[in-house]
Structures are given as structure tokens and as C-alpha cells.
Image (tube, rainbow, N blue to C red):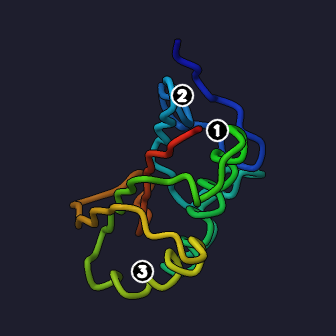
Amino acid sequence: MLKYITDAHGAPAAIGPYSQAVEGGNLVFLSGQIPLNPENGEIVSADVKEQTKQVMSNLSAVLAHSGLTFRNVMKSTIYLSDMNNFSAVNEVYENCLEGVKPARATVEVARLPKDVLVEIDMIAFKS
């Protein structure tokens, strides 16, 4: 049975017709998060490190809604508007994960929603 998460406290509401996450069996698929402040829906900053911190905070809130942390993450995908931001994003990402190293892909894309610099999605395991 699938559970659709649409109201994780501390994460921004979806800006389209999708759920913040979907739980199915032992897997939780988190939709891509962009650096929106969950309180006002605004982009937090033009700085890629600040944007990445907000993205990770949003993802953490969605994970917490399912009783999970970054320790449960098996796979993530990072979408960058500019691959020159790879090192800065990687630094923040690594610090947020606190030693956890899930499988990952990082890709440069032509454009992201609201012209942000970074978006991240994740797949987590729920035991």
C-alpha cells in the first residue's frame, strides 16, 4: 500500500501536482527539493551553499515525517544548474549527512524550477 506525504512539517509545500514523498513497502521516495523557505515559499539566497543547506533541511524534514534520518538514505540525485558549483554543494551535502555516504548521481541541467542553483531528491529505506 502506498502512502503519499504531502504535509511534512518543516518542508515547503509542493509547487506542482506531486507529493513531497511516497512510501511503498520499505522504500520512501522523496521528491526533489529546491531551496524554498517552508515558512514563506521564497528562495532562501542566491548563494549556492545557502541554497544547498536549505535543500538538505527540507529533505531532513520530509525524512523525519516518516521517522527517518539521512542514515536511511540509500540513493540521492543532485541536479546543478552549473557544474562549477559541484565542490561547494558537495561540501554542504557531506556535512549534512554526518558520515553517511549513500549512492549518488550528480548532473548538470539546463534549468531548475524557479531558476534555483540546486535540487536534490532521495530514496530511503524504512526498516
- The residue under the point 57% across, 39% down is 126
Mark 2: few, some, or many residues within 10 Å (few <14, many ≥20)?
Answer: some
Please state if 18 lies on the left or on the right of 86 as rendered: right
In 3D space, how far apart are the residues under numbered discs 3 and 1 (Cα atoms)? 25 Å
Compared with 123, 116 (above or below) is below
- Mark 3 lies on a secondary structure that is helix
Q: Quadrant of residue 106?
A: bottom left
- The residue under the point 50% across, 54% down is 73
In 3D space, how far apart are the residues under numbered discs 3 and 2 (Cα atoms)? 27 Å
Q: Which residue is mark 3?
A: 90
Q: Earlier in the sequence, mark 3 or mark 1?
A: 1
Mark 1: few, some, or many residues within 10 Å (few <14, many ≥20)?
Answer: some
16 vs 5, nearest the viewer: 5
Q: Amino acid at mark 3?
A: Asn
Count of picture labels? 3
- Mark 1 lies on a secondary structure that is loop
- The residue under the point 58% across, 64% down is 56
Q: Which residue is mark 1?
A: 13
In 3D space, how far apart are the residues under numbered discs 2 and 1 (Cα atoms)? 17 Å
Q: Amino acid at mark 2?
A: Glu
Q: Earlier in the sequence, mark 2 or mark 1?
A: 1
Q: Nearer the viewer, mark 3 or mark 2?
A: 2
- The residue under the point 66% across, 47% down is 68
Q: Quadrant of residue 80?
A: bottom left
Q: Nearer the viewer, mark 2 or mark 1?
A: 2
Q: Earlier in the sequence, mark 3 or mark 2?
A: 2
Q: Which residue is mark 2?
A: 23
Percent across and percent down for residue 58 are 63, 55
